[in-house]
Structure formats: structure tokens, C-alpha cells
Image (tube, rainbow, N blue to C red):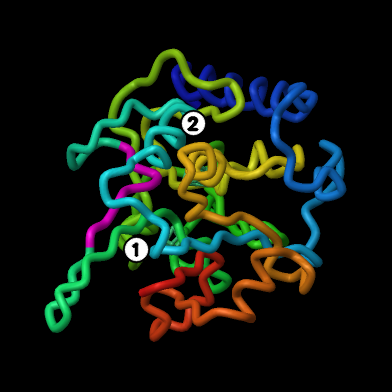
Amino acid sequence: MSCANKSRREFLGTTAVATASLAVAPGVMLIDMAHGRAPEEAASSSVRWGMLVDTNKCDSGCTDCVTACNTENGLSGDTSETGSQWIRKVELKDMRTGKATSLPMMCQHCAEPPCVDVCPTGASFKRADGIVLVDKHICIGCRYCVMACPYKARSFIHEALADQNPDVPRGKGVVESCTMCVHRVDKGQTTACAEACTKAGHDAILFGDLNDANSEISKRVSTFATKQVRADLGLNTGVRYQGI
Ligand code: SF4
Ligand code: SF4
């Protein structure tokens, strides 16, 4: 192992431990503390975390979810081809009706994720609670997953990074994507994009447990017509959309 690799892995290991021992910050809006996990507790398949985006409420001029994601995860906001974008705003126009729709796209946290299927090292993996992640300790940067993802949700880190968020360790030479704010979710909090959307007064992004029939997200998914983007692929996405 090269010195550079060794120090990066040691850094990632150290910050993972630090992350695990963090307490919930006072005043942070909580979804449901009963869903918070102790650091030693494994993720449970009784939960399936997901998000529902109501495109009727999404403001085309608003990028607060993108800004919040960048801030939360230490991304620079570089939107060039080599920049890391975990979430991006997409504008759609219905050619027949002229209706314009604005929506955020991020990793869809597929139940049948092609990124996991093609990963030669097992770095790309799905947790029991449906969150799809990359283990940066064993990612070799081959980028097979980048090519396999139909949503263009993954980015490769080309440059050395400084001033990272200790909750979200990142490093040059590996692949990354939306983590569904797993470091927040494991503390019983909502995602940064959903929180920012609510703060902006739009309330277009709802985070919750798709397996819990009594959760707000499940009630809305069972009450309203919601869609999975490219449902024809049969990936059973954890991110759903309303109004498209
Ligand atoms: S959206 Fe892409 S990166 Fe996310 S789980 Fe699905 S295939 Fe993997
Ligand atoms: S869930 Fe978190 S990591 Fe994913 S797009 Fe929203 S803010 Fe970014």
C-alpha cells in the first residue's frame, strides 16, 4: 500500500469512528428519534429509507436542496464534467402541453442497484435499510458503477481534497454519490436536502420509511399517484416522484 493510500485509509478510518460517536446536536430538527441507531447497531431491513419529491411544490428557480447537499457533504459545487454533483436540478417540458416541471435528481437508492451488481470489489453496496453507499476503503476507482447507473448519479473524485466535513470523509481516486445523508439518518435526523426544502417553504422533499405504513411518506405513496423515474428498468427506486 502506498503512503498516500495508507494515510487516506487511516484518515477515513479515524473519521468513521469520530462520526459514530457524535451526539445529536441540540436544536436539530428530528424526524423520529426511535429510528436513530446506536453506533454498534446494524441497519435493519425492517426499515426502507426513501424520499418522495412532490414536483408540484418544487420551485424551478430554487436550488436550496443542491446548496444544502454541497454544504452538508463538503462538495465544492463544481458543476463541470469532472465536478462532484450528488444532487442536481432538472427542468422538464412536456412537448404536448408545454407544462414545465422542475425536480431534483440524486441517487435513487435502487433496491436492485446496477452499480452494486457491476462493482468488482464489493465497494458499492446496499445497506439492509435500502441506502446505497460506496465503501471508500475498498473502491479502486474503476468507475464501472458510474457507467452502470442509469441516473448518472455517481461522480469520481479527480483532485485531492482539503477541508472535508469530518462526518463525510471523501478522497481522491474513488467514486461517490448521494448517501441519503446516512450520517444524519443514523442519528434520527432527516436529510439535508429535505430540511432545506422545508426551510425554503416549499416542502417538496419528504424523507421517511417506505416500510412503515403509518409514515407520512408511505401514506402519500399509497394515496397519490407517484412514479419511479425509469420504472421500466425494474430497479425499485427508493426515491419517488409526484406530479410527473
Ligand atoms: S441510482 Fe445509480 S448509484 Fe444510485 S443505487 Fe441506483 S444505480 Fe446505484
Ligand atoms: S439526501 Fe443528503 S446526500 Fe442525498 S441529495 Fe439529499 S442532501 Fe445530498
Q: Is residue 3 above or below residue 73?
A: above
Name the image quarter holding residue 106: bottom left
Query: How many callouts does the rendering have?
Result: 2
Q: Main secondary structure of the magenta part?
A: strand
| Residue nearer the viewer, 200 or 131 | 200
- CA neighbours of label 1 inside 10 A, class few (<14), some (14 to 19), many (20+): some
Q: Amino acid at mark 2?
A: Asn
Where residue 189 appears, as percent x and y from the top left, is: 70, 40
Specify whether 88 is left or right of 219. left
Q: Which residues are magenta?
A: 84-91
Instruction: Tell me the number on the disc at residue 73.
Output: 2
C-beta proximity under 8 Å, tags 1 and 2: no
| Residue nearer the viewer, 52 or 223 | 223
Name the element at disc 2: helix
Name the element at disc 1: loop
Instruction: Tell me the number on the disc at residue 106.
Output: none
Cβ of disc 1 within 8 Å of ligand 1? yes
Name the image quarter holding residue 13: top right
Cβ of disc 2 within 8 Å of ligand 2? yes
Specify whether 4 is left or right of 39. left
Instruction: Tell me the number on the disc at residue 151.
Output: 1
Q: Is residue 30 magenta?
A: no
Specify whether 207 is left or right of 155. right
Q: CA distance from mark 1 to mark 2?
A: 20 Å
Q: Residue at x 32, y 48 (%)?
A: 88
Q: Amino acid at mark 1?
A: Tyr
